[in-house]
Image: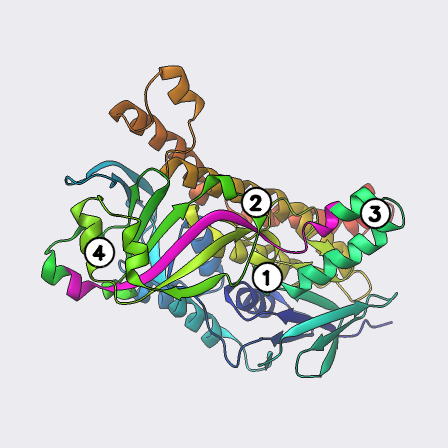
């Protein structure tokens, strides 16, 4: 009996969803049907800057995108150890000072999100179905695993597997956890309430003020300004500033992050993004160093984002439905890892679904292997990202500083703090997604034997 064509629906046409579609096409030798359902009327990314590191670059090379993206980078990436982000003290009236420089393979490759999105859309093969103005409202799985999706325009569609790449406020995750909670309620009310807590993201107590600065305008008032060529994190109490060049240096991605630690984990109220006055952002940096003031003076418009998280999601998968990227593990931007983690999700999930042995009948096994491989890695990166932000804001005191008996913002404290942050940032260039794939492939090969304990374990998840 010949298995039917595997039908894969991807809800969300951002970086994660498009990376998955390109990965599927790259590795599938069997016949599969790929459909992307995007809520907007076109593929479009929100936000501006993105940093790419060695692990992510490995995947982009695997997809054959390195040449096009290298041409869009401020500096073409090279494999040698290269300077990346500079750490700088910024919350004082006098000129700030650099106190640490990250050096890593490829350094930090800074791009405009729109440039990465364009390269991905240009790489989509013509046979991939693209459906716009298709906002997911609900889905239903029958006993066979068939997924029926309902959209806001009144249409429905069917697939053998649904991938929710629909962002932080993911409808796919919302429906998944409502269903999981309803099922659990028949056994355990406390467990049901726990699962319901993952339906919506929580606010991290952080506002991110995002803007673009025209590099030419900045250099007119501040010739040689550091951020025109170098990514910089300006440390300060309860707030920090990130600035780095993008679009071949034409613009500087400028983000001010202001934290309210007591609000961590509170319920998200209102819109996650609103346009605000430049003065609202500037007021948070009164008394900061000239380099930051020069950047602020060149900001023409500004938006305020409520930084949210989906922390410690217990499952990325339920039946024939999986979530990836921000839908699964929305995290703080402090490690520059969100997009990279979505691409790593797409790498593992795409290669699993593309494998010749995966069919509509056993796709749930591949999805569970994806969760087994990716959930612990993404969770660890999300934790690192949160902790890094606390370090930039002097709200986390590592044991090494406590044992040394020095203040975080002293010269010795800044040195020890930098070493702590560097250890967390090193995830970007430690290990390889290729090694993660070999582990996933091994699990998939073992699962082909019905008597193998791996299949029995995965099937119970």
| Residues at marks 2 and 1, CA–CA distance in whole angstroms | 15 Å
Mark 1 or mark 4, earlier in chain: 1
N-terminal of the two: label 2 or label 1?
1
Identify the residue at horizontal 58%, vertical 75% (top origin). Answer: 39
Q: Which residue is mark 1?
A: 169
Residue 73 placed where, x, y %?
A: 31, 62
What residue would you read off at disc 4?
295
Q: Residue at x 43, y 26 (%)?
A: 398
Marks 4 and 2 in Cβ contact (< 8 Å): no
Q: Which span of residues is magenta-colored?
A: 194-218
Compared to residue 401, the image places residue 146 above or below, namely: below
The residue that appears at 40% across and 69% down in the rendered structure is 114
Dot 3 or dot 2, earlier in sequence: 2
- Does any portion of residue 253 appear in the rendered image? no
Q: Are marks 2 and 1 in contact (CB under 8 Å)?
A: no
The correct choice, above or below, for 32 with respect to 342 in the image is: below
State the residue position of label 2. Answer: 265
Q: Nearer the viewer, mark 4 or mark 2?
A: 2
């Amino acid at each position: 009996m010949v298995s039917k064509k595997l039908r894969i629906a991807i809800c969300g046409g951002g970086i994660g969803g498009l990376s998955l579609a390109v990965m599927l096409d790259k590795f599938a030798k069997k016949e599969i049907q790929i459909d992307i359902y995007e809520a907007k009327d076109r593929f479009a990314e929100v936000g501006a800057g993105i940093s790419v590191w060695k692990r992510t670059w490995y995947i982009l090379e695997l997809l054959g995108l390195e040449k096009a993206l290298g041409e869009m980078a401020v500096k073409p990436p090279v494999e040698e150890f290269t300077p990346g982000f500079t750490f700088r003290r910024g919350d004082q009236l006098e000129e700030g000072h650099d106190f640490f420089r990250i050096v890593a393979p490829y350094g930090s490759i800074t791009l405009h999100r729109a440039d990465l999105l364009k390269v991905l859309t240009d790489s989509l093969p013509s046979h991939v179905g693209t459906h716009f103005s298709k906002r997911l409202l609900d889905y239903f799985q029958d006993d066979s695993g068939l997924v029926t999706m309902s959209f806001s325009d009144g249409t429905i569609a069917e697939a053998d597997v649904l991938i929710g790449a629909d962002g932080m406020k993911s409808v796919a995750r919302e429906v998944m956890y409502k269903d999981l909670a309803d099922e659990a309620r028949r056994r355990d009310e406390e467990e049901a309430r726990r699962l319901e807590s993952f339906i919506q993201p929580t606010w991290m107590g952080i506002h991110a003020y995002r803007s673009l600065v025209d590099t030419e305008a900045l250099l007119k008032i501040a010739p040689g300004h550091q951020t025109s060529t170098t990514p910089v994190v300006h440390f300060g109490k309860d707030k920090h500033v990130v600035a780095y060049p993008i679009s071949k240096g034409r613009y500087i991605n400028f983000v001010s992050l202001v934290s309210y630690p007591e609000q961590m984990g509170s319920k998200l109220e209102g819109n996650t993004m609103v346009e605000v006055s430049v003065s609202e952002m500037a007021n948070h940096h009164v008394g900061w160093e000239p380099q930051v003031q020069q950047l602020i003076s060149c900001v023409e418009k500004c938006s305020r984002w409520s930084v949210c998280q989906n922390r410690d999601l217990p499952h990325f998968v339920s039946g024939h439905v999986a979530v990836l990227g921000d839908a699964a593990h929305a995290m703080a931007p402090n490690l520059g890892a969100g997009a990279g983690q979505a691409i790593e999700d797409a790498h593992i999930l795409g290669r699993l679904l593309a494998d010749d042995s995966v069919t509509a009948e056993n796709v749930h096994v591949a999805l569970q292997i994806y969760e087994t491989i990716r959930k612990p890695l993404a969770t660890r990166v999300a934790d690192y990202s949160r902790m890094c932000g606390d370090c930039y804001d002097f709200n986390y005191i590592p044991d090494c500083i406590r044992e040394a008996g020095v203040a975080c913002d002293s010269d010795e404290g800044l040195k020890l703090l930098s070493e702590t942050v560097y250890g967390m940032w090193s995830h970007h260039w430690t290990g390889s997604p290729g090694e993660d794939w070999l582990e996933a492939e091994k699990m998939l090969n073992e699962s082909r034997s019905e008597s193998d304990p791996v299949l029995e374990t995965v099937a119970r998840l």
